Image (cartoon, helix red, strand yellow):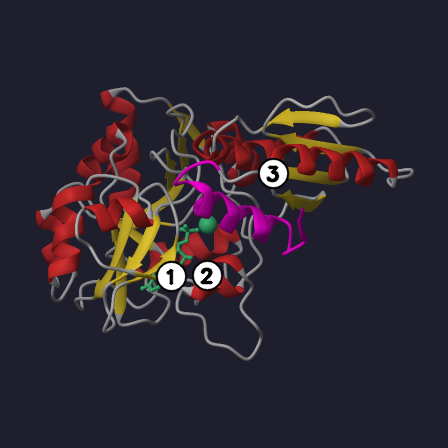
Amino acid sequence: MDTKIFKTSEQEIGEAGKIIRKGGLAAFPTETVYGLGASAFSSDAAKKIYEAKGRPSDNPLIVHVCDKNQICDIAEEIPDGARAVIDKFMPGPITIILKKKQIIPDTVTGGLETVAIRFPKNETAVRLIKAAGVPIAAPSANLSGKPSPTKAKHVIKDMMGRIDAIIDGGNCEVGVESTIVDFSGEKPVILRPGGVTYNDLKEHGIDVEIDKNILQSVSANEAPKCPGMKYKHYAPEAEVTVVEGEESAVREKIKELLDGVHGKTAGVLTMCSADYDNAVILSAGSTNKEYAKNLFSALREFDELGVEIVFAEFCEKDGYALAVKNRLYKAAAQRVIHV
Ligand code: AMP
Ligand code: MG
């Protein structure tokens, strides 16, 4: 299939919106990561998303809306906590899970009776949803299992020839996917940490729990609350090991680990531009917020540079720590050394 590459002119966004309205697939930027969009009202279009990504069909999609009223069209009821999230944090990098209305096909929700809803802040995303005239179901626009795309070139690498169009709208600001809060059970639970942090929610009087699987893998006999939790995620070709703790101890440990690497190309993802010998060094930025923005892009860059073993420094600095650790631990298949 021929994949059209669009920029963000009125005419191009209009054309991409038409592709989605007619049942096709278009990738688009959001403030978190690039999404792979299809009409949220079309079961056939949703199926195409799973095919293009190689995504298991029980891993549901997030439905993107462009105004708060649209939420009532697709969700059965809105509890007080969810209403507070909508009022305080939307548009923004947060997704709420609510009981779904019939209009959302089961294919979009992976067979669940609930629907994940997000109102993005990114201007291009909002213009596209408006142009499509329907809510847009979209997971991240990467091949299943790979790091999420934060630049148009990542989407082009994974999706060229597999989808109808890609809108190049520059780099994503937040860099990790939205915070997901499930409001469909008795107590609201954060299923995935992201740009809106636990403390942000608490400061606005929104009481939530944090799912225990956020920093560990789901065991084979356990049913994950968020279907995506049980699948391989964010995995680059390189083998990643996280070294976590106080800065100087982390640096010492990585030096020792690098000494033990023989015959393979090693890389370090650093928070403090440390001077390691015999390693390809990429910067994650000095804060966890910067780390979130740079992480997926760096993982992809290590692969491009032929790096086979990556040591990722991690020091806790700010509210983004949980969101970064969640992705980093998964990218490292839980290989984490605490020093
Ligand atoms: P991605 O688009 O790659 O960020 O994936 C969307 C995430 O939202 C996946 O981890 C899904 O499992 C999760 N998700 C979507 N809909 C639901 C839902 N109804 N209940 C629980 N998790 C959901
Ligand atoms: Mg994803």
Circles 3, 2 touching at the beta carbon (< 8 Å): no
Dot 1: what SS?
Answer: loop
Q: Which of marks 3 and 2 is in front?
A: 3
Locate residue 135, reporting x and y percent: 21, 48
Neighbour class for label 2 at 10 Å: few (<14), some, many (≥20)?
some
Give the Cα separation between the discs numbered 2 and 1. Answer: 8 Å
Dot 2: what SS?
Answer: helix
Q: What stretch is highlighted in magenta?
A: 317-339
Circles 3, 1 touching at the beta carbon (< 8 Å): no
Name the quadrant containing residue 129. top left
Q: What residue type is labelled 2?
A: Gly
Q: Is residue 185 left or right of residue 246?
A: left
Locate residue 132, reporting x and y percent: 22, 40
Give the Cα separation between the discs numbered 3 and 1. Answer: 38 Å
Q: Name the residue under label 1.
A: 60
Neighbour class for label 1 at 10 Å: few (<14), some, many (≥20)?
many
Question: In the image, is the residue at mark 1 within 8 Å of ligand 1 by its beta carbon?
Answer: yes
Q: Name the residue under label 3.
A: 246
Q: What residue type is labelled 3?
A: Glu
Question: In the image, is the residue at mark 3 within 8 Å of ligand 2 by its beta carbon?
Answer: no
Circles 2, 1 touching at the beta carbon (< 8 Å): yes
Locate residue 169, reporting x and y percent: 37, 25
Nearer to the camera, 149 or 51: 149
Nearer to the camera, 3 or 235: 235
Q: Is residue 324 inside the magenta stretch?
A: yes
Is tag 3's residue or tag 2's residue first in the polypeptide sequence?
Answer: 2
Q: Name the residue under label 2.
A: 228
Residue 138 in sight here: yes
Q: What residue type is labelled 1?
A: Pro
